[in-house]
Image (cartoon, helix red, strand yellow):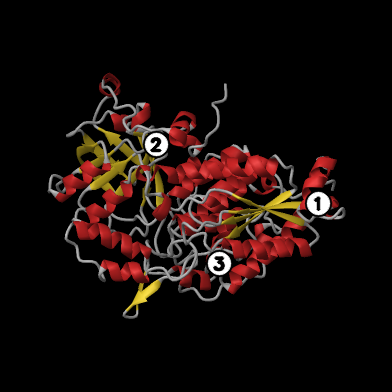
Amino acid sequence: MKLRSLDANSPGRRANWKALGLSKEDMEKPKIAVVNSSSELAICYAHLDGIAKLVKEAIREAGGVPFEVRTAAPSDFITGAGKSGSYILAGRDIIANDIEVQVEAALLDGMICLTSCDKTPPGHLMAAARLNIPTILVIGGYQQAGEIDGEPVDVEDVWSGQVGAIFGKKPKFPIPDMAENAIRGPGVCAGMATANTMHCVVEALGMALPGHAPVRGNSPKMQANAKAAGRRIVEMVMEDLRPRDILTPAAFKNAVATVLAVSGSINAIKHLQATAIEAENGVDVFALWEEMSDVPVLSPVRPTGHIRIEQFEDAGGARATLKRLLPMIDGSALTVSGKTLADNLADYEIEGPDVIQPLDNPVGKGPAIAILKGNFADTAVVRLGVRDGSRPEEFTGPARVFEDTATCMDAIKTGVIKEGDVIVSRNQGLKGGPAMGGGASLVLFALDAAGLAKTTAFVTDGQLSGLCLKGLTVAEVSPEAATGGPIGKVRDGDVITISVANRSIDVALTAEELAAREGVGVRVPASGYLDNFRQAVRGMETGGVLLPEKS
C-alpha cells in the first residue's frame, strides 16, 4: 500500500522533521499519530504520558514513526466546575475537531488514541470515523478504589454522600474520610458509569484489540495492551484496514447489545449516534436500541448492582459479555485485529458464570435502557437497570416544573415536591444548557436522599451521570425546551404519563393545546465556545454533533 504521508513529503517537511531527529529512512515509514489527552488536572489522564511512551516504542519497533499530539481532556469532576458542567459534553467535539486539524492536516497514515474519561472515547471514535485512517483505541483504564474499615469506597460514594448530607441523610462513612480514600490510582471512575461503558463499547465496536476493556489503570495488563496496539497499528496501515470497514451497522448492533447486557450509561446512546453520523453508515441508534430490547442484563455492575468493576474485568469484561451474546449479535463484524468478532471469540473460554451470566440464566430481563416516545417527546431515555420491581415503570402524576437545578433542589429540600409528582427539570439540553450542562444528576441524587426517588418521577431534557440509577428517571427528552419542544410548554399541574411497557411518555394535552402554548426558548446565557456550540449543535437525533445542516 502507498502511504499517503509520502505524498506530502517536501524539502520543508524534511527540514522540520530532521530537526526533530527523523532520518531519511524515517520519511519513508508509516507515520502514526499517538493521540494523548494527558492532563495534570485530572487523575483520569494523569498516567497517559507513560502509556504514550510505551505505544511510541512499540510503533518504532514495528517499523513506524510515532508523533504524539495532544487534545483537550474533559473530566466531569474537574472541568465540570465551570458553567454548570456545560464544558463536559462540549469537549467531546473539540477532541474530534482537534484530532482532525492535527492528524488530517499533517496527512499522517494512522493513529492510536489513548482513550480515558467519558468524552474521549466518543471523541476518538468520531475522529476515527471522520478521518477514516487506520485507528486503534487504547483503553485508559479505571482507577483503584479505596476502602475504609475493610469496605470498598469509590467516588460514587463521595458524590452521593455529599448530596445526601444536604438533606440530612447520613453517609456510609464521614465524607472527608471517603474523599481521602476513594481514589488510589490513575484512571476513570470505578463502576459501569459512562467511561467504563464507553470502554466496553469501543471493544464491542471492534475498535480496540480483544480483551482490553475494562482494565485497571496503569496496570501491567494495560501496559501490555498498549504495546500490542502500537505494534498492530503499523500492520493495519499496511493492510489499509480503516474505521469505516469496522464501524458497520453490525458493529453498532454489537455495541448496543453490550451496553444493555451490562446496564451501562444512557450517555452511550448519543455517543454511538454521533459516531454513526461521522461514519456515514446510516445507523439509527435509537431504532436499533428498540430492536435489541430483548437483550437481558447479564452482569449487574455498580451502580446497577453489587458487582464491582474489578470483578467484571477479572471475569472477562467486554470480551466475555460478547461471548455470551454471540447468539443475539453479529459475529461477522470486522475488528481492528483483522479478524471478525466471531473469530476473535472462537477459542475464548469464560471463567465461571457467577459474574457474567449466560443468556439462559440472566440477572434480569431486558431492556436495561429503553427509548420512550409520545406527544411529550420524539425520543427520551429511561435507564431501568435490573428490572426487579424495586423501581416503578408506570407512572401518572401532575407536573412540577422547574427552570433550573437550584430551584428544583430547593423545592426538594423545603418539601414542595410531594409523592406522586412528576418533576420536570428543563433548559438543560444541547442548546438550552448549553451542551447539556445544568446538573440534572444532582436533582436525582437529591430525590433519593429525600426519600422521594421511588414515589416520584423525574423528567429532564438534560443528561445524567452514568452513576445515576435511582427511581423512574427520563432524560435527554428531545426536542428540548430551548427548541420549542413540549417539555418547554408543560405547566405545573399538567398530567404526565410514563409507560415503559408502552415505551411512551405523554402529557394530557391535545396537539392544539400544545401548539397554542408558548415555549420557554433559550434562557441560559452563553459566550465564547459555548455560544459557538449552541449555534452549531444539531439535535439529539444526531447525538448532538457539530455539523452544518445538510440542504
Q: Provide residue 194's location: percent of width, then percent of height.
A: 45, 54
Q: Secondary structure at mark 1?
A: helix
Residue extending farthest to the right is: 24
Q: Secondary structure at mark 3?
A: helix
In this rendering, does residue 398 appear at all? yes
- Mark 2, Cα crowd under 10 Å, few <14 / some 14-19 / many 20+, is many
- Mark 1, Cα crowd under 10 Å, few <14 / some 14-19 / many 20+, is some
Dots 3, 2 in contact, CB < 8 A: no
Residue extending farthest to the left is: 415
Query: Which tag is nearer the camera, tag 2 or tag 1?
Result: 1
Q: Earlier in the sequence, mark 2 or mark 1?
A: 1
Q: What number is the disc on residue 434?
A: 2
Q: Earlier in the sequence, mark 3 or mark 1?
A: 1
Q: How many marks?
A: 3
Q: Earlier in the sequence, mark 3 or mark 2?
A: 3
Q: Secondary structure at mark 2?
A: loop
Q: Residue at x 30, y 23 (%)?
A: 511
